[in-house]
Image (spheres, grey):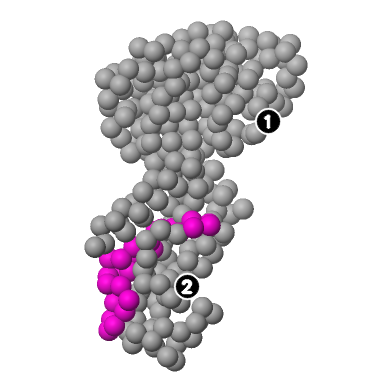
Amino acid sequence: RTWGREMDWLRAVQQLRDNREPGVLVTVIEVRGHAPREAGAQMVVSREASWGSVGGGNLEATAVARAREMMSSGATGPQTCELQLNPHAHTEHGRQCCGGSVRMLLEPLAVRPVVALFGIGHVGYELARILSRLPVQLLLVDSRAEQLDRVRLADVIDGTADVSTRHTLLGEQVLEQLPRGAHVVIATHDHAEDYALCDAALRLGQPLGSIGLIGSSVKWTRFQAQLAAAGHRPAAIGRITCPIGQPGITGKDPAVIAVAVAAALVQKLTAGLENRVTA
């Protein structure tokens, strides 16, 4: 039976995603002659473990080593690997004498960026709908339980993103739990709540990917003065983008605002990916 083995690697993919760990999916895509596994065999490789099997021996050891090289180099595109399984074909992991050849496809399982959206009102809801169609981990936070009702969020939950919700009166506690590089959008119904989140975001020990605040220039001028009075230096305050959005997209309709904010966020997400690849 191979069903249990398949379930192992399928669960591994979800586990790596939940833990925000990189991995590589290895698939046997072509077999010529005799080989330990047939085309379609799959395994998942992380930095420290593997699940499933593509055949064991030097074949599998080579696949694991290549997968970990891809993770170390930050590779984002798929690669192929072909091995000859005969006594004359020697790799650093030994020989395999099945007599055939195997070609494998190695596909990186990227770590999904985290976007934390504070405030799921009219604009926040529309923004969540757009972001839920992207390969991100989307955290929706609100102090009002009814805004996070699963029936209301049905269009958001049924998307590509991994969506989770947090009902809390203290969004600052959620900020403290965000991973390094998370992107934050502050759009609550209460300006006092918005300010508390901005203040907390600037006091975090780990750097965030970006901090966006929805609001007018008048609101931001007042917030800048309050943040400075609270001891934040101008360079730190400058980490907050307000108003947030894409220049050239204007309008006050919640859906239009959400499109502008989403466009600006996509630019930041893309830039973050490019920085990881070239670093």
Q: Is residue 125 visible?
A: yes
- Which residue is located at x 44 percent, y 28 percent? 139
In x, y percent, where is residue 187? 48, 17
* Residue occupied by mark 1: 205
Amino acid type for the residue under numbered disc 2 = Thr
Give above or below for 125 relative to 107: above
- Which residue is located at x 64 percent, y 17 percent? 199
Amino acid type for the residue under numbered disc 1 = Gly
Q: Residues within 10 Å of mark 1 (few under 14, many from 20)?
A: few
Q: Is residue 261 visible?
A: no
* Residue occupied by mark 2: 62
- Which residue is located at x 25 percent, y 57 percent? 3
**Distance in Å between CA atoms under marks 2 and 1:** 40 Å
Quadrant into which the N terminus falls? bottom left
Quarter residue 136 falls in: top left
In x, y percent, where is residue 65? 51, 68
- Which residue is located at x 50 percent, y 48 percent? 21
Pick the front one: 158 or 243: 158
> Which range of residues does the magenta coloring cover?
24-49
Tell which tag, 2 or 1, sits nearer the viewer.
2
In x, y percent, where is residue 47? 53, 57
Give above or below for 65 relative to 246: below
Left or right for 84, reference 176: left
**Secondary structure category for the residue under label 2:** helix
Pick the front one: 212 or 175: 175
Pick the front one: 89 or 107: 89
Give above or below for 189 relative to 60: above
In x, y percent, where is residue 181? 57, 37
